[in-house]
Image (tube, rainbow, N blue to C red):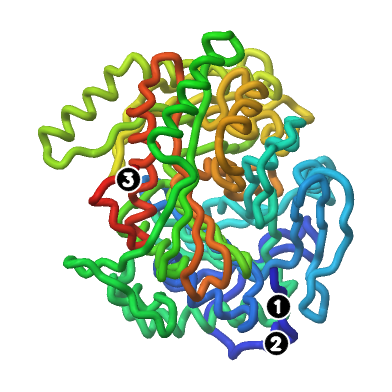
Amino acid sequence: MTGMDDAMGTTASNSSATAVSVSDAYGPSAPSVTPLPYHPVADMADALAETMSADGRGAMMLLHSARGGRYTMLGLHPYRRLLQIGDRVRDESLAADGRWRGATVEGDALALLGEWLSERSGRSADMAAPVASDPVTGERLPLADGVMGFMSYDDGLRREGIRSRHSRSAIPDAAWWWFDDILIEDMLAGTVTLVSHRRMPGGAERIIERWNSRRRQRGTATGVPSVHDMMDGIMPGAVPRRDGHGTTIAGWSSDHDRASYCEGIRALCGRMRDGDIYVTNYSLRLRVRSLIAPPVMFNRLRSDNPSPFMAYLDAGDWQIISSSPERFLESRGGHVVTQPIKGTRPRGRDVAEDDRLRGELEHSFKDRSELLMITDLERNDLSRIAMPGTVSTTGFAELEAYPHVFHLVSTVEADVSPGRTIADVLAALSPGGSITGAPKHSAMTLIDRYEHSARGAYTGSLGYIDASGDCDLSILIRMAIHQGNAAVGGAYSIGGGGGVTLDSDPDFEYDEAMQKTEALLSALGCDTRKGWHD
């Protein structure tokens, strides 16, 4: 990762926006809130990232709900980070010279985060977590002081004591950033608020100036940039090959063909017959070479595959692009919710086929039984940190429709026991049951044995955690990892998979895994019309 340079001390010209003090109880680090003229934050993210250093831009993270959610958040100007790399944690702060400095220790980033949350959780009046309110509506904003980041699936292997046979990913196993400036868009109220801790001299002022300047340039138009605009993100100097429909073509390969994937499914079913596990998850990895740059891919997904938990994380020399439909964990005032997904069908080519596939999923014994087992696993995991008698299933096998697929979803809720932090909850639930299996430890051991590549961030979790303990994190599915500078395309890694039970048909499971990658491949310009190269 690259840090921010000395230019961070430069102050931008004054803006007419007015900052409002938030909390006297939090001392000198109290954030301020500034209302900004309304414009969708996701449309402005890349331009605002340019307010950071020109050579590395630090890290930035966008959480965007493109379907059904209320808030979009953009974190800029990080000042502290925790990076989990194997069994070691790098706890670093941004120094005055723009470089990251700190200590590397044996340990667990989630445990360190838990210690920070305990200090900020209101155990004493002088350390109460700050609360920021929308200056227009007066409603509490979801994030006033906290972290944004992710935990990988491989980090879950480490915490389960499972040593993977695969080479580890090139990106950290977990990464959490404290951002000095956070833009929060309330899509219901039509407001945008800048929450700033003002540790970076002039940072908030530059954001306000850039916001007003870009908004004037764009006028009052909203929405996703056009394909023609997005094509500006293709590699400079590259000449993309196009098919007859004008789509940019990219190349891809897989660590499985149909035969090897089906062989893995049959091996796992054999372990089920032996009684080692009773449900699991199996996946493959695609390697893609594309001219499409990561921000362009994200905007294409916003347009073609809008999802409740979209995310774009730029860490400087690697990026995560996600259009996840699945909530891993939400916490509000000590009440937690998880919503596992199991059961998938593709959307039909016409209304009749769409209705047939919907009905097929709704009445599938295999998919409903698979979801029932995972729902039970989530109930058991939550019971480890919940107040007795509060774990409940408030929704089961509810059908959700997305542009490319149908899903079945359950909802499990609980009240967290006093004395527990959200870090304890994450430790109990991670990795999510829907992408591991049951019993979880045995399922993860067998996943590592039979899958052909490390999962890395794929099937981990990503989102934000407020100092109050409130949070919202998604499961990292329908996601890609890009290695390199965000300004150009290059190498991407994509995962796809699905649940496995004794009733699984191996060929069907392979088709489902590939169907789940289709929107991502399309966003990168891959031509899947000729099939899955199997």
Percent x, y for residue 396? 41, 20
Residue 504 location, quadrant: top left
Percent x, y for residue 92? 81, 62
In the figure, is residue 374 to the left or right of 26? Answer: left
Q: Residue at the spot x=34%, y=79% of the render?
A: 239
Q: Residue at the spot x=52%, y=75% of the render?
A: 48
Q: CA distance from mark 1 to mark 2?
A: 8 Å
Pointer 3: what residue? 532
Q: CA distance from mark 3 to mark 1?
A: 42 Å
Any mark on residue 4, and which?
A: 1
Pointer 2: what residue? 7
Percent x, y for residue 47? 48, 77
Percent x, y for residue 39? 40, 69
Q: Secondary structure at mark 2?
A: helix
Q: Secondary structure at mark 3?
A: loop
Residue 346 location, quadrant: top left
Amino acid residing under circle 3: Trp
